């Protein structure tokens, strides 16, 4: 075997090593993308759970109920509580919007976000809060939220307790 033959074999082995390295890097990039998306989903779930807990806390629940309904007897403290809870919701929406726009959130999560946000925009108090707070967000996001709100019909009265009682009665009767 000549020195030229050994050089050719070495070059071949080097090429195979580079190919294997590229395959390894490709696998690592794919795994990193999956881990990043999992971290984003976890962050989303954490934000939503925190918002739910905050709104259900005894200190804020009455403010949320009165705020959502647009109750005339909402106190100044309750209005401030409601303002900040809505603010958190709007920041959550902004994060969801830009994550999807940048390709970081999948279509299923985005569809869930759209459905939930449209439902929230049926609440008169949330609609008013959006109109009062929208100027502090970037125009692109404002236009997106305005379009969502236009698709939602406001619900001015709600008997949540009556609906709950009827649903429980139907469940007990086996009519669900």
Image: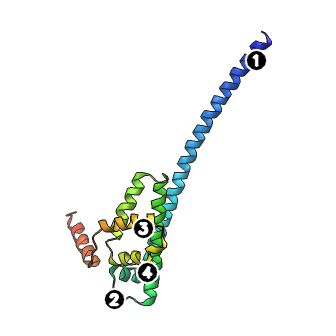
Q: How many marks?
A: 4
Judge whether 1 appears above or below 171 on screen.
above
Residue 16 coordinates in the image, percent (x, y): 66, 25
Q: Is residue 93 visible?
A: no
The residue indicated by pointer 2 is 72
Q: Is residue 10 visible?
A: yes
Residue 154 coordinates in the image, percent (x, y): 28, 73
User: Residue at coordinates 44% horizontally, 52% vertically from top-left?
Assistant: 106
Q: CA distance from mark 3 to mark 1?
A: 64 Å
- Asked whether disc 4 touches disc 3, contact meaning CB atoms under 8 Å apart, the reply is no
Position of the C terminus by quadrant: bottom left
Q: Earlier in the sequence, mark 2 or mark 1?
A: 1
Q: Residues within 10 Å of mark 1 (few under 14, many from 20)?
A: few
Judge whether 55 appears above or below 110 on screen.
below
| Element assignment for label 1 | helix
Residue 87 coordinates in the image, percent (x, y): 47, 74
Q: Earlier in the sequence, mark 4 or mark 3?
A: 4
Q: Which mark is residue 142?
A: 3
The residue indicated by pointer 1 is 7
Left or right: 39 with respect to 168? Answer: right
Q: Earlier in the sequence, mark 3 or mark 1?
A: 1
| Element assignment for label 3 | helix
The residue indicated by pointer 4 is 82
Q: Earlier in the sequence, mark 4 or mark 2?
A: 2
User: Residue at coordinates 30% horizontally, 65% vertically from top-left?
Assistant: 151
User: Residue at coordinates 37% horizontally, 68% vertically from top-left?
Assistant: 146
Which of 112/163 is in front? 112
Residue 22 quadrant? top right
Q: CA distance from mark 1 to mark 4?
A: 75 Å
């Amino acid at each position: 075997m000549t020195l030229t033959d050994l050089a050719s074999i070495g070059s071949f082995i080097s090429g195979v090593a580079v190919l294997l390295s590229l395959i390894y890097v490709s696998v690592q990039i794919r795994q990193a993308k999956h881990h990043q998306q999992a971290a984003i989903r976890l962050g989303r779930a954490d934000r939503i759970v925190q918002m739910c807990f905050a709104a259900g806390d005894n200190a804020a629940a009455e403010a949320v109920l009165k705020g959502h309904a647009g109750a005339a007897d909402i106190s100044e403290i309750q209005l401030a509580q409601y303002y900040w809870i809505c603010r958190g919701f709007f920041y959550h929406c902004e994060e969801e919007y830009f994550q999807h726009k940048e390709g970081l959130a999948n279509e299923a999560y985005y569809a869930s976000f759209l459905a939930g946000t449209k439902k929230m925009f049926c609440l008169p108090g949330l609609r008013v809060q959006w109109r009062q707070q929208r100027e502090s967000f970037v125009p692109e996001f404002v236009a997106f939220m305005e379009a969502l709100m236009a698709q939602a019909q406001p619900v001015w009265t709600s008997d949540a307790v009556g609906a709950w009682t009827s649903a429980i009665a139907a469940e007990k009767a086996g009519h669900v």
